Image (tube, coloured by chain):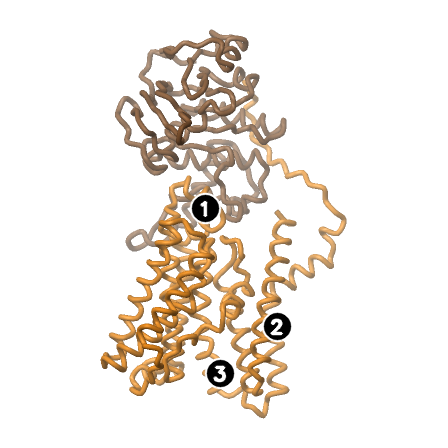
Chain colours: A orange, B brown
Amino acid sequence: MFPSSAIESVPKARKAAWWINSPLLRMLEVLLSNSLLMATIVLVVIYSIIARHLNFFTFENLVNILISATVGGFLTWGLAVTMLAGNIDFSTQGVSAVASIMMGVLFMQLGWGALPTLVAVVLASAILGLLTSLLVVNLKIPGLVATIAVNGSYVATAMFLCNNYQINIRRPDLENLFFKFRILNIPFSVWLMFAFFGFAWVVLNHTKLGAHIYAAGANPIAARLNGVRVDWVIRITLVWSAVCVALAAMIQTARSGITLLFGSSGGLYADLGPVVLGGISLFGGRGRLENMLVAIAFTSVLYNGLYLMNASTGTIRMTYGLVFLIAILMSAAREWFAKLRA
Amino acid sequence: MKESSSVPILECRGVSKAFGAVQAVNKVNWKIYPGEVTALVGDNGAGKSTLIKLIAGALVRDEGEIYVKGQLADINTPQDAFRYGIATIYQDLALVETRDVVMNMFLGNELTHGPFGLFLDHKRMQREAERILHEEIHLHLPSVRQLVSRLSGGQRQAVAVGRALLRGGEIIIMDEPTAALGVEQTAEVLRLIDTLRSRGKTVVVISHNLTQIFQIADRISVMFHGEMVGTRRTVETTREEIVSMIVGVKTDSLAVA
């Protein structure tokens, strides 16, 4: 009935604008995909010149950068995975407040050991993630609205738990566990952050769950029709995100020696900055976790330098905002290039 | 054409589905025979897509039974339908544009290896995807690792069909496969359907294009206002008869056995 010849690969017809393959555009594209790494290198060079009397290049400062990167790292791995699944988690502050206060209560007021406290807080945050997922998955409330709503109630819960008093962390075992216990002279908390990164990377790239996270994020309807359990994917990513936030909060609390109601997260855009900067699409399903490493390196070096130079809080806040602004501009440029080359 | 005396590979008995007050599918009895191409036609809103979704497990029927190869099939989710060898290619193809061809073909059905089957077997998936596309449906892509967003409409349809075959689909349901395609690509898809039939697959096609249907289908089933008004063998009917059934002028409540 029909000639059974091979189906030809017919290239998609497209009106090709003259500039589409111009060297300038190609160069911009290359610049865009490598901009973060280059910016980090430039930053390091600048700091080593202007801040050399401030010991930027000492091993202790490197460890300091790594430690401050730990908090941002955990927040970033958490958010990145949620956003790849096409969701967003704005309950960062609430979960970290609950985690911080709970750590204070268990560790100081009830006298629990460091490890039991760690495990209990991680479990509790997983339950918080599950609660959030009840709204997002079971009640079908958009993640943006649902997580902002639970964020408020989690902060309130944390205030209620601590009766509005901050708890001082006076026993050293948690601090010892996170910062003094070192392997190859690198603190345990840093290793833990890299372990979480490695785990998330393997899951995203080499497991069914990872494939389903990407698919659910890019096209949830298609994923569902192909038998992907999108609801479970979203539930799991929200739990993962809450656990990451809790670890960030505990490390921050142990470091500052006092429980923090509004501590570990530097505000929504400060948390979101590195994720978007590293190229995780705001629309879900696109982006690679390894780029988060560069993004975290960039922001950690940037903020560390500002602190070393005694920058004012205003300057630091403004930098958070600028980084986020640049991040979303770059994200928009990426979407534009992706459409252009499709 | 094969003899119709064989047992239906798929049968609906009294299948119904309502959305609120709208009875989208009303007590449909329908038989699909193995190795044939059956076309499902009807006006917009006649209930074709809903019926297909009930069979594919994308919607849950209110009442009625579905039999696959004479056995009662309990289909409530897409996974259930896959298990019975029913693979559906929706109008929008349900492809994830930002993922490559291989990951799309194995979406929801990924091959794994290693301890407890924890890890994706990327190599075997790529080999299998290439084999199915080249040998079964004669699609030659420069690379199966390219993103679906870079494929033409006909190529995408072929990838979606490849996925259906990978799932072990014996009954391939296609919802408006040529609706969004140009002349050239439509011909590709019709060849594809022909190839599937020659491989012994059962194909169900929803279409509006009667010319295409008379070219490709062995049987034509017509729905009107949620009801199955009849099935005709293509060689024994005319365009006029089918059109009069589509507009509801001519009905017979008994499907041709």
> What residue is drawn where x is 56% and y is 90%?
A54
Q: Is residue A208 visible?
A: no
> In the rendered image, which quarter contains the N terminus of chain B?
top left
Which of the chains bears the disc numbered 3? Answer: A
Left or right side of B63 for B188: right
Q: Are marks 3 and 2 in contact (CB under 8 Å)?
A: no
Question: Rounded to the nearest whole Å, what is the CA distance between mark 1 and mark 2?
Answer: 35 Å
Front-lying residue, B142 or B155:
B155
Please name the amino acid that badge 3 sits on: Leu
Local secondary structure at mark 3: helix
What residue appears at the point 55 percent right and 61 percent down from the top-left corner? A279
Q: Please rate how many residues cluster around mark 3, counting C-alpha atoms within 10 Å: few if below 14, some from 14 to 19, many from 20.
A: some
Q: Nearer the viewer, mark 3 or mark 1?
A: 1
Q: Position of residue A98 (x, y in %)?
A: 35, 71
Q: Nearer the viewer, residue B209 or A259?
A: A259
Earlier residue among tags 3 and 1: 3
Displayed quadrant of residue B85: top left
Residue A301, percent across and down?
54, 78
- Which residue type carries mark 2? Ala
Indicate which disc, 3 or 2, sits on the residue closer to the N terminus.
2
Q: Which mark is residue A39?
A: 2
